[in-house]
Amino acid sequence: MLIAHLSDPHLRPRGVLYQGVVDSNAMFKAAIHHLNGLRPEPDLVILSGDLVDTGSRDEYAHALDLLATIGKPLLAIPGNHDEREAFRAAFLDRPWMVRSGPLHVVADGFGPVRIIGFDVTVPGAHHGEVDEAAAAWLVDTLEADPERPTIIMMHQPPLETGVPYLDAYRCFNAARLETIVRRFPAVERVLCGHVHRMMQVRFGGTLLMTAPSTTTSIALRPWPDAEPASFVEPPAMLLHHWRPDAGLVSHVVPIGTFPGPYDFA
């Protein structure tokens, strides 16, 4: 099973630049073009939040036009820049979308790996939180098939990166989530977005990874008085390959056209 993982495209209305600097719409088109050219083809595409930048219905309408060019099934969760009800309305025709409440979603019909979309967003805020109700839902969902290889996808990562302007808006109550993940060894990955960088760390007995953004990268400044900044670095996606003999093997895939291929010894 091959899973393509996109994150944080921050789509804008047509003709509007993200942060007044870059054309995030064009960058997402390039990401989709790259994704559609992957061989072998992914079985599923997942998107770990911040599909749009302000949560407007114009942005979601444009996002749906772009997503329609992906030739594979999609599972998406909201981020802090999404608006929950507008996000729900945009994907209400998808079989995985829930009709009310937090946007916890499950995809278990696309291959051997179950994907749990875990909505930790707090409406109107930039941080995330694992409250008691969300924790109970996650336990119930994992207990329904405890031996099934599983990915938990969420937006804000439950970790301190050492970058102060990222850590201020992380997912809080991380210990509550870590305890749950440790109870279920079949959780192969915890996948996040939000930080616009690829990071990885041990978490709850498994591996937690954050995905790069298809638009700008947030500056890596791990010192206490660091000022927030972003750069137009090469965008990328993640590719997760489930192999029964090895588990989940994850790759960073730069987006674009590059010199090569060249022979090597």
Image: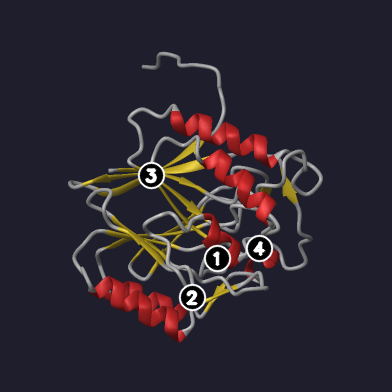
Dot 4 or dot 2: first in sequence order is 2
How far apart are labels 3 and 2 at the CA level? 23 Å
Dot 3 or dot 1: first in sequence order is 3
Kind of element beneath mark 4: loop
Q: Specify the quadrant that holds the N terminus.
A: top left
How far apart are labels 1 and 4 at the CA level? 14 Å
Task: Tell me: residue 64, above or below residue 69.
Answer: below
Residue count near mark 3 (Cα–Cα under 10 Å), binned few <14, some 14–19, many ≥20: few
Kind of element beneath mark 2: loop
Residue type highlighted by circle 2: Gly
Q: Residue at x 55, y 17 (%)?
A: 259
Residue marked by disc 2: 101
Residues at marks 4 and 2 touching, judged by CB atoms closer than 8 Å: no
Residue count near mark 1 (Cα–Cα under 10 Å), binned few <14, some 14–19, many ≥20: many
Q: Is residue 203 visible?
A: yes
Position of 248 with respect to 27 (left or right) is left
Q: Which label is found at residue 73?
A: 3
Residue count near mark 4 (Cα–Cα under 10 Å), binned few <14, some 14–19, many ≥20: many
Q: Residue at x 47, y 58 (%)?
A: 92
Residue type highlighted by circle 1: Gln
Q: Position of residue 132 (x, y in %)?
A: 44, 86
Q: Position of residue 143 (x, y in %)?
A: 24, 75
Residue type highlighted by circle 4: Val
Dot 1 or dot 2: first in sequence order is 2
Residue marked by disc 4: 163
Residue marked by disc 1: 156
Q: Residue 263 lies in what quarter of the image?
A: top left
Residues at marks 3 and 2 touching, judged by CB atoms closer than 8 Å: no
Q: Nearer the viewer, mark 4 or mark 2?
A: 2
Dot 1 or dot 4: first in sequence order is 1
Task: Tell me: residue 234, above or below residue 146.
Answer: above
Q: Position of residue 220 (x, y in %)?
A: 66, 53
